[in-house]
Image (cartoon, rainbow, N blue to C red):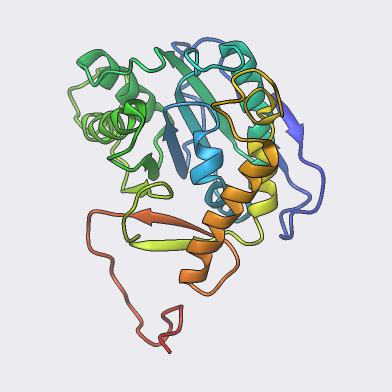
Amino acid sequence: MIRPIRGNHNTALATRYYHVWHMRDPNEPFENLRPLDVLAIAAHPDDVEQTCGGTLIKMAERGYRTGVLDLTAGDMGSRGTPDLRITESRRAAEHMLLSWRQNLRMPDARLENNIGARMTLAGVIRRIRPKTVILPYWTGRHPDHYRTCELGYEACFLAGLKRLEEDTPPHRPFKILYSSLYANVTPSFVIDVSRQFDRRMAALLSYSSQYGDSAQASDLFPSRAEVEERLASIAKFYGNLIGVKYGEPYVVKEMMEVDDIIAMPVRSI
């Protein structure tokens, strides 16, 4: 499926076409898909829109091929249906300028880090060959989120083993980032998403089943206005850490290299 993205992108790429490609079958071969530069792996539709959507938009605006792999369709959620949430995720993909998005329809609220799930995910990674992978932080309230982190990391490792599959070449992503927006930890770095924040919010609000004002499960869900206020406040907090309006935080497990101490961003005093 190829759709033009209309509107102001604030970049020289504003007139480009962005491709949102959806497989009809999660097991359908897709070896001809061009490799992705960035892949975000999430437990549910709307997770990446809350945590790393601005970063994905920013990378797409710079010409990188970005994608999202949702492991479940949120079928245990109090609002909406799995098919509706996948439809909403496709609308959100357009706002985020994604090159690819897919949903593996694994069981929501029952994700398990088992060999079947790891092999399935490793097979996808070998085929779409991302350079950088974004995962949820490794602790959290919802078990699916930290299971996704475990699965993602172990699948990235397995995907690099030559003998794992005979019909696809090995591939191991170079970099793994952990989105730490909802974790009470000091980030390794923060991405400035000030120019991308409105588009990120439009992507999130594509999930009208979750964020539209509805009487259904209203005791569990904040109002749309409150959602917007909360997410803006969090993004402002992290933006303030680097002296910008809105930011998205990340953690990496390895040490970061600095090549030029004169060109380092974010002033000290």
Q: Nearer the viewer, residue 123 or 145?
A: 145
Most foreground residue, 223 or 179: 223
Q: Residue at x 28, y 69 (%)?
A: 257
Q: Is residue 41 visible?
A: yes
The image quarter containing residue 224 is top right
Residue that protrudes farthest toward the right in the picture? 7
- Vertical relation: 12 (above or below) 104: below
* Image quadrant where one finds the N terminus: top right
Residue under the image location 45 percent in, 17 percent down: 104
Check the image and name the residue furthest to the front. Answer: 219
Q: Is residue 198 left or right of residue 86?
A: right
Q: Residue at x 31, y 74 (%)?
A: 258
Q: Position of residue 139 (x, y in %)?
A: 28, 40
Residue 114 coordinates in the image, percent (x, y): 21, 17
x and y percentages locating residue 38 in the rendered image: 46, 44
Q: Please say if 26 is above or below 254.
A: above
Above/below status of 30 relative to 229: above
